[in-house]
Amino acid sequence: MSSNIILPRSFYERDTLCVAKDLLGKVLKFADYQGVINEVEAYIGQDDPACHAARGCTPRTAVMFGAAGFSYVYLIYGIYHCLNIVTEREGFPAAVLIRGIDLYKPTVLSLNGPGKLCKKLNITKNNNQIDLTQSHDFCVYDSKSQPEYIVTPRIGIKVGTDKLWSFKSM
């Protein structure tokens, strides 16, 4: 399924839309879990009203202004965690939200929705600001898979709905 080669920082230091599309088919590894990423969304810069960094650098969003390849995990509605991976260059806040995976280890299960994904894998704010290019317990493995995908508006937001920055494997 995967090559067990961790994606390097240079993979994430690219244009966020390219990173988002290229994450489809890659393998998310967290603790004993592994699954193929099948749905993502892009959030790009302070001009994107749906991006958490639109209001500037805060203690919560500081990781987004840092180096690419780090996890950005936050809590929504007071109950659901969401996993993002920081992209682009330092000082430019952008990230890709991991919306879904097809889990294949230790069990087979499709996890659609970022809250369900984090709940099942037990990803919490304790996993915020982890360097995914250096951790063997929390990383993204390369794969040869390049699935076809559909493009849609982002889900569950009220602003920035004109952006077609959600990508889902077919």
Image (tube, rainbow, N blue to C red):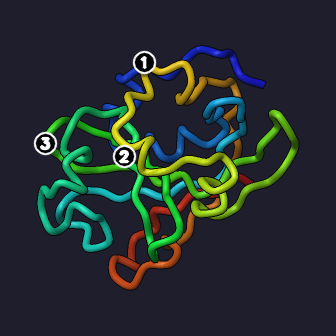
Q: Residue drawn at (35%, 23%), measured in percent from left and top? A: 10
Q: Residue drawn at (22%, 50%), measured in percent from left and top? A: 93
Residue on which the image places disc 1: 134
Relative to 78, residue 60 above or below: above
Graded by Cα atoms within 10 Å as few (under 14), some (14 to 19) or many (20 or more), the crowding at tag 1 reads some
Q: Residue drawn at (50%, 78%), measured in percent from left and top? A: 156
Secondary structure state at the residue bearing disc 2: helix
Relative to 106, residue 20 above or below: below
Graded by Cα atoms within 10 Å as few (under 14), some (14 to 19) or many (20 or more), the crowding at tag 3 reads some
Residue on which the image places disc 2: 16
- Residue 149 in view (yes/no): no
Question: Residue 6: percent from the left, percent from the top?
Answer: 53, 19
Graded by Cα atoms within 10 Å as few (under 14), some (14 to 19) or many (20 or more), the crowding at tag 2 reads many
Secondary structure state at the residue bearing disc 3: loop
Q: Which mark is residue 51?
A: none
Pointers 3 and 1 in contact (C-beta within 8 Å): no
Pointers 3 and 2 in contact (C-beta within 8 Å): no
Question: Residue 35: percent from the left, percent from the top?
Answer: 72, 38
Tell me if 138 is positioned left or right of 11 in this view: right
Q: CA distance from mark 3 to mark 2?
A: 14 Å
Residue on which the image places disc 3: 91
